Amino acid sequence: MNQVNRKYKRLVIKMETPIAKTGNGPAVGGKINNLLLLGNLTKNSSEGKKYLVKGLRGWINHAMMTLAKEEGVEVCHTSEKTETQKGVSLLPEGFHAAGKCNEEEEEECLKHKLMGSFRKPSKIQFEPVIIISNYYKGKIPNGVQVMHIATEKRNALKQHTKEAIQDFGERYFAGEFTLTINFREELSQEELGFLLKTILYAPELRLGAAGNNGAGKVTIKEVHLQQVERSRGFNAQGKVVEEEKTRNLHKEMREAMNA
Ligand SMILES: [Zn+2]
């Protein structure tokens, strides 16, 4: 054996947003950087600024919960806590605490099977979506997606004097991007079907912040279930050679939708 191989499945989801401001929940006041800047660039660096789009897993998680509720299926809530110290219930109707699926029957709910919990790893793994501005004219690094990225500068003024009391900027991005979800193990037809329906449902929820002001609208344009076969080995000079073969599994995808 002169190389290592791995065979797995993944979903490749192509989508588009006119404007999205993603982050880790709403940040109140101060300077808001919605996208996470990767690397520490010096002034003379010829490299473009790369940003990690946050909030995609949370968006899918949320869509899964909303869809399950609409379909009347009980699933895990994102929280493991069932009530406050004062005994006030924290879980809305139709949800159980994360990982507390029908404990007696040892049957997990669909969301737990797919997304796991603190104690159980998720069956699916989100590839990071890393983007670079379309103003950048240099070489685009491997695996980085080109999008429109800009900062909306805003300020809050004092009522009578028009004196600025707060200055902040919200970074946003726009355009087409691809999200890849890798399967760490084989999904059942039912699990795959639920995941596909969740993805189709997700545009009903806004991605990221400022949804009520028009941000975060997403259109899902294409979804492909793929079989991936990857191998990695050395050539005679000790350089690592990687090969990837992919095959679309459209029939399997259609069957899962009916499961
Ligand atoms: Zn559950």
Image (cartoon, grey):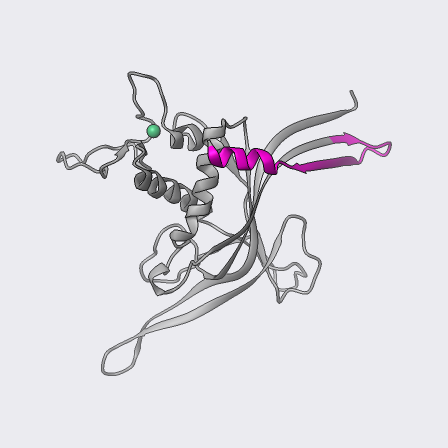
Residue at (31% x, 25% y) in the render: 101
86 w.r.t. 34: above or below: above
Instruction: Work out whether residue 144 or residue 161 is closer to the camera in this orientation and state it.
Output: 144
Is residue 58 found left or right of 94 in the rendered image?
right
Instruction: Work out whether residue 202 or residue 90 is closer to the camera in this orientation and state it.
Output: 202
The quadrant where ligand 1 appears is top left
Q: Does residue 239 belong to the magenta stretch?
A: yes
Q: Position of residue 71 (x, y in %)?
A: 33, 38
Quadrant placement of the N terminus:
top right
Q: Position of residue 52 (x, y in %)?
A: 52, 51
Residue 57 visible in rendering: no
Among the 4 quarters of the image, the one containing residue 182: top right
Residue 130 visible in rendering: yes
Name the outermost residue toward the bottom: 161
What segment is highlighted magenta in the picture? 232-258
Q: Position of residue 2 (x, y in %)?
A: 79, 23
Among the 4 quarters of the image, the one containing residue 114: top left
Q: Position of residue 251 (x, y in %)?
A: 59, 35
